[in-house]
Amino acid sequence: MVITKTPFRMSFFGGGTDIENYFKENKGAVLSTTFDKYCYVNVRHLPRFFNYTTELSYSKTERVTDISAIEHPAIRNAMQMLDMHEIRLTYEADLPARSGLGTSSSFAVGMLNAFYALKGKYADKKKLADDAIYLERMLCGEAGGWQDQVAASYGGFNRIDFNVDGYEINPVIISPRRKKSLNENLMMFFTGFTRFSSDIQRLNEKEGQHNKLAMLKEMFDLVDEAEKILVDSSKNLDDFGRLLDYTWKLKRQTGKAVSTDSIDELYIKGLKAGALGGKLLGAGGGGFLIFYVQPEYKENVRDAMSGLLHIPFEFENGGTRVIYYSPEDYVPRDNIV
């Protein structure tokens, strides 16, 4: 049996520039962190007492005798890619799926990590990120960027650069005290709306490309500006919050599906209560709102968001990892004498 633990991520700047079609031509970068909310994937070989050979438990339960009959596209394609057979897989998470935190990619990374371990193989963080990108973007044909898979695999507070050669992870060098202040000044709330990120991406791709390209280039430039605020202790950390407000307003212009009237109303309420800025996490359309709030206004913002669930969190640095490993002897049915 193998159990993996994989963090979710929040992306602050540069989202959209991590899409392959964009960064292969223009370069891209994101500023993001993983935090202490996780998904857990438990995998073991299924005992041969049942009239099915694969059992999957996520938001639903599947029991099949043929891998090709699996409905969940990521599980089906991952099992075929790594030649997995006769398994029982269980998925659990601290936060809901389709909420803008890269949950599907965290699941993909954690599942691949578990599959490799069950086969007695070690896969490093780059291997897991690359395989998860291939799984989701190529085999499953899902629209979206590369940042989620990289963040979930490596963990930590990073600047991730994308170019024609792939990607490069650069940890953000920030003092522990300043990082703690940033963490304490961020407040996250669940809007209650969930959606498929790939659906939002496809809707936004239909928008006019000329203006969108200019906005994406500006969003790329904001990564540099935000990183400078974090690493230079002489700069006012509150400017990070103000820059979040700017990048959110910019992102809203990249597609009509990014926000909704209800989300816009919530965001305005947060600003009126004292937040310096914020954004909706992920591709848009729903999920989690994050605000940058100075300590003296946190209670006001919490009251303004009283209809939403407040989610306290702390940054984390671990990325995906195997937290339980018990080797299993597995002999394929065809080899049993």
Image (cartoon, rainbow, N blue to C red):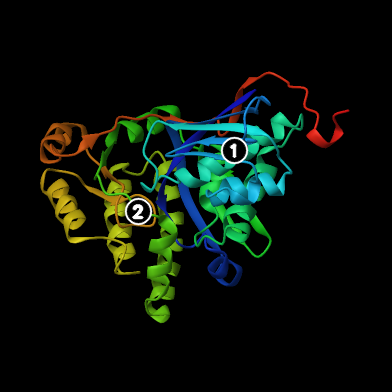
User: What residue appears at the point 45 percent right and 62 percent down from the top-left corner?
Assistant: 16
Looking at the rendering, in which quadrant would you find the C terminus?
A: top right
Looking at the rendering, in which quadrant would you find the N terminus?
A: top right
| Residue at the disc numbered 1 | 111
- Of all residues shown, which one is farthest toward the front? 51
Disc 2 marks a residue whose amino acid type is Arg
- Of all residues shown, which one is farthest toward the right? 337
Q: Earlier in the sequence, mark 2 or mark 1?
A: 1
| Residue at the disc numbered 2 | 195
* Left or right side of 239 for 147: right
Percent of width and height locating residue 277: 24, 49
Residue toward you, 25 or 143: 143
Q: Residues within 10 Å of mark 2 (few under 14, many from 20)?
A: some
Secondary structure, mark 2, is loop
User: What residue appears at the point 53 percent right and 62 percent down from the top-left corner?
Assistant: 28
Residue toward you, 55 or 18: 55
User: What residue appears at the point 73 percent right and 22 percent down from the top-left corner?
Assistant: 328
> Visible in this render: residue 168?
no
Percent of width and height locating residue 256: 29, 69
